[in-house]
Amino acid sequence: MKTLLRPLVCFVVFAGLCAACTPPEEDVHPKKRSSRSDNLKRYMPKAQELRALEQARSRPVVDGPLLDAAALKEFLPKSPDTRISAAVSAQRVALQNLVREEFARRAADKIASLISRFGTEAAAAAQSAQTPQELAARMEELNARYTEALSAASQEETARGWGLPDKGQSRLSKQDLQAVFQRLSAELERDYGALCAKKAEPVLRKAADGYALVLSSVKTPEDLDEQFARVGSEADEAFARVSAKYGDPALTLTPENAAALKARMISAHQQVEQSFEKLYGKDAVLQTRALFERYLAGAEKLFAAPGRLSAATERLDALNAAYREEMTALQVKLNEDLEQKLLAARIVRPL
C-alpha cells in the first residue's frame, strides 16, 4: 500500500509546487501586452485624424460666395432721397421772391408817385406864392407831409417779409413746379430705373396737387411755409417706400470702395487656401490660386463699371457660382488623385 501511495504523494507535491510557481494571468508576457497598449495610444489619434480628413474631403471646401452680393448695397447712398421736398422748398422760395419783387415794384411806384406829386405841388407853390415868406412856409409844409409819407412807405416795405401771392403768382408757381417735377422724374429714372420712376409718378402728382391746395386755402404766410414743408415731407416718405420696393439704383464705386471689396475677396480666398493645404497639401494651393486670379479679374472689371445694382448683383453672383463650381471640380480631381495613390500603396508585393 505504501508503494502505491508514494507516487501519488509525489504527484500532489509536484503539482502544488508548479501551482505556486505559475505567475498570474495578467503577468504573462507583460512586454507584449504593454506594446499593444502603446500602439493603440500612438496610432488611434492618427487614425481619427485621417478619418476626419477623409470626411472633410467629402464636403465642399467652397460652399458659399467669396463676396456676398449684398455687400454692394453698402456703397449706395446712405441718406434718404429728399429731392421732392427740396423741389417744393425751392419753389416756395421762388414764390416768395416773386411776391417780394412785385411788392418792391409797387412800393417803388408808390414812392415815385409821391415824389412826382411833391414836385408838382412844389412848382405850383412857387408860382402861386406872393412873397418869399409865403413860399417858404408852403415848402416847409410840403416837405413835412411828403417826408412822412415817404417814411411810411419805406417802413411798410421794410417791415413786410412776404405776403400771400395773388392768383396770377399762384398759377405761375404751380406751372413752374410741374416743370420741375417733369425734370425730376427723368432724374429718378436715371438714378433708380424706369420702373421706379413710373411708380413714383403718383407721388409727384400728389405733391403737386398738395402744393396747389395749400396755395388756395391758407390765410397767412406762416401757414403757407408750414404746409409747404408738410407736403414735401410726406412726398419724401412716400418716395422712400416706392424706391425701397421698386428701386434699382445706379451703383458707383470709388477706387477706395473697389479696393475694400477686393481685400475682402483675397481674405476669404486665403481661408480657402488654408483648407486646401490641410486636406491636399501645398501643391493644391497653387492650383486654387490660378482659379482665384480669374475670379478676381472678373470682379475688378465689375467694380470698374458696375452699372445698376441688379446688374452688378447678377454679375457678382455669376462670378461666385463659377468660382464655387471650379473649386469643387478641383476638389473632385484631387480626391481622385489621392485615391489612386492610396490604391497604388495597397498593392501587395510578392515575397
Image (cartoon, grey):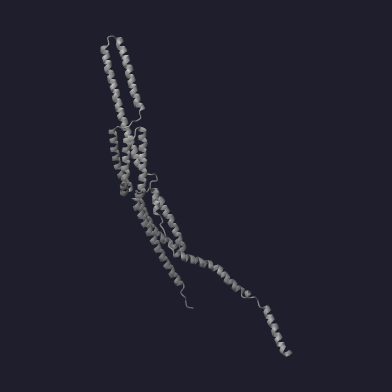
- In the rendered image, the vertical position of residue 40 relative to residue 174, given as above or below: below
Q: Residue at x 39, y 54 (%)?
A: 69
Q: Residue furthest right?
A: 2
x and y percent of residue 161 in the render? Answer: 35, 30
- The x and y percentages for residue 97 are 32, 32
Where is residue 148? Give x, y as percent. Answer: 34, 20
Tell me where residue 15 appears, x and y as whole percent: 68, 82
Query: On the rendered structure, is 283 left or right of 11?
Result: left
The quarter of the rendered structure image containing the N terminus is: bottom right
Q: Residue at x 35, y 32 (%)?
A: 221
Image mark count = 0
Q: Quadrant of residue 102?
A: top left
Q: Is residue 241 visible?
A: yes
Q: Is residue 305 visible?
A: no
Q: Nearer the viewer, residue 124 or 39?
A: 124
Tell me the residue at 38%/59% (across/down).
Answer: 323
The image quarter containing residue 92 is top left
